[in-house]
Amino acid sequence: MSHVIGLKCRECGTEYPAGIQNTCYECFGPLEVNYDWDYISDHISKEKIAAGPKSIWRYADMLPLESEKRVDLGAGFNKLHRARRLGAALGLDELYILDESVNPTNSFKDRVTSVAISKALEFDIKAVGCASTGNLAAAVGAHAAKAGLPAYIFIPATIELGKIVQMLIYGPNVIAVEGTYDDANRLASEVADSHPDWAFVNINIRPYYTEGSKTLAYETAEQLNWQVPDHVVAPLASGALLCAISRGYKELERVGLVDKADFKISGSQPLNCSPISTAVQSNSEVVPVRNFETVAHSLAIGNPADGYYAKKTILDSGGFAASPTDTEIIEAIHLLARTEGIFTEPAGGTTVAGLKKLVESGHIQKDERVVVYVTGNGLKAQDTLLKSLQRPPVIKPMISEFERLFAPKLDIHEQKAAVAI
Ligand SMILES: Cc1ncc(COP(=O)(O)O)c(C=O)c1O
Ligand SMILES: [Zn+2]
């Protein structure tokens, strides 16, 4: 008896055994993992989770693995920060940040990759791969190295240098494609089709991959003492992350770990590549975009695989979507760093900038308990961020030089301190 029944079509409900498959043969709908929720409800408890590892694997009873073959670098169970200073700056009474920049390869993609490659081992695959906007590449490179498997990683050639350096260090085969993520993804899909015993984490084993992200909802609720926030905000690229977070909260209610999963979920996408946000804002179909240019490279997907479902998830919950400009994204990176001490890349800047816009437009209320997901680390995007910072002044190693530079500032600090006393 297992907690996993197999795979199931999200559209027509046709069931399949667990295997390397992502599309329904009957209607071409996407497949998702089909769990035995009654079995899980009987076997799960808050105490069992609390006694588990401090990683995504504390929720193994609700993840698709059926063996103990885990490829585990320690992803997940990251700190939910109470963000008082950012909350005050944005006009929110109770804001929290789940900081994903501290994962093993510094983005939330370690969650999805750890689950996907662990599951792939159950299928006796010969290699792993992915199409990536940058972060998934590093996660797949690292987890493939840990598993001792060859990896084939397809990226658009124009992503940040920091991300390329990071992925190369793990030794995978990196294929930089001329064009956008959508071009790289198309090529990766063709390669996956011609190598049926290779597991491409976000292509032919996508149903298992997306399951990793729902642990973000689980650990948020656990750190809120098994309560669900009023409103959550997540970044959007393919839309898979946002759908998984929403699903995660609902599953907690299904198995009785929370009383009620009553929440709104909102998304944010860079204005220059915002097919899902545009569809939410105008309540229209998701129309793919081409020829885009944005600083938020990791969110630059013009043809989002889960766009339709992300839009529906947002609107059904009563949430909304934002689309900040590149300037607003960079400003939000600075704001987050200076108020909360968290350094994020433009994907996180997009989310924080989106949060700001949603508060300003009244879609998020002052008294809501809000959680924002900061999904990647700023150190990966230094080439982008250097342009928004001033290099430090260079002085001779003399106290007089320091005083010359800082005396006016020190005066102001002393005056402020006197007022505070
Ligand atoms: C840092 C970061 N945040 C968010 C996302 C969006 O994820 P999804 O494609 O599941 O919407 C990505 C995707 O690559 C990412 O790298
Ligand atoms: Zn179907």
Image: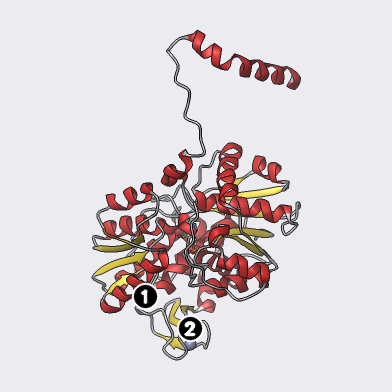
Q: Nearer the viewer, residue 393 or 208?
A: 393
1 and 2 marks in contact (CB < 8 Å): no
Image x and y of residue 287, in percent: 55, 73
Disc 1 is placed on an element classified as: loop
What residue would you read off at disc 1?
204
Q: Nearer the viewer, residue 5 or 359?
A: 359
Residue at 61 percent across and 38 percent down: it is 339
Q: Quadrant of the C terminus?
A: top right
Residue at 52 percent across and 88 percent down: it is 12
What residue would you read off at disc 2?
29
Disc 2 residue type (three-letter): Gly
Q: How many numbered badges does the structure rendering display?
A: 2
Query: Considering only order in the chain, which callout, 2 or 1, is on the residue closer to the N terminus?
Result: 2
Q: Is residue 153 visible?
A: yes
Q: Which colour assignment does the render follow?
A: secondary structure
Q: Specify the label residue 384 is tagged with.
A: none
Image x and y of residue 18, in percent: 38, 80
Q: Is residue 52 visible?
A: no
- Left or right side of 400 for 204: left
Q: Quadrant of the N terminus?
A: bottom left
Q: Nearer the viewer, residue 385 or 47?
A: 385
Disc 1 residue type (three-letter): Asn
Image x and y of residue 208, in percent: 42, 71
Disc 2 is placed on an element classified as: loop
